């Protein structure tokens, strides 16, 4: 249970980081 929750939260953080990076690239054009 805790391992699954930690895994899910790390996936969410990775997704948020990727979205932020994509936004930074898009807004720098």
Image (cartoon, grey):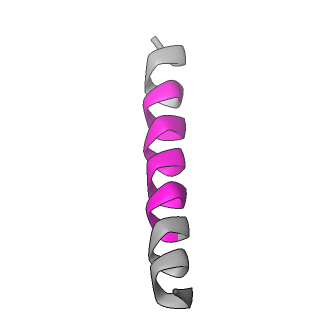
Q: In percent of the image, x 48 and y 36: which residue is there?
A: 19
Q: Is residue 20 above or below residue 10?
A: above
Q: Is residue 3 above or below residue 16?
A: below
Between 19 and 26, the residue placed more toward the observer is 19
The quarter of the picture where residue 11 lies is: bottom left
Q: How many marks?
A: 0
Q: Main secondary structure of the magenta part?
A: helix
Residue 21 x/y as whole percent? 47, 39
Between 23 and 5, the residue placed more toward the observer is 5
Determine if the magenta segment contains residue 9: no
Outermost top residue: 29
Q: Is residue 23 above or below residue 16?
A: above
Residue 15 x/y as whole percent? 45, 49
The quarter of the picture where residue 29 lies is: top left
Between 22 and 4, the residue placed more toward the observer is 4
State the extent of the magenta-drawn residues as a range. Answer: 10-23
Q: Is residue 16 above or below residue 24?
A: below
Determine if the magenta segment contains residue 14: yes
Residue 3 x/y as whole percent? 48, 88
Q: In percent of the image, x 51 and y 50: which residue is there?
A: 17
Q: In percent of the image, x 43 and y 31: which residue is there?
A: 22
């Amino acid at each position: 249970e805790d391992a699954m929750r930690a895994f899910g939260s790390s996936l969410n953080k990775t997704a948020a980081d990727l979205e932020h990076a994509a936004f930074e690239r898009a807004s720098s054009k």
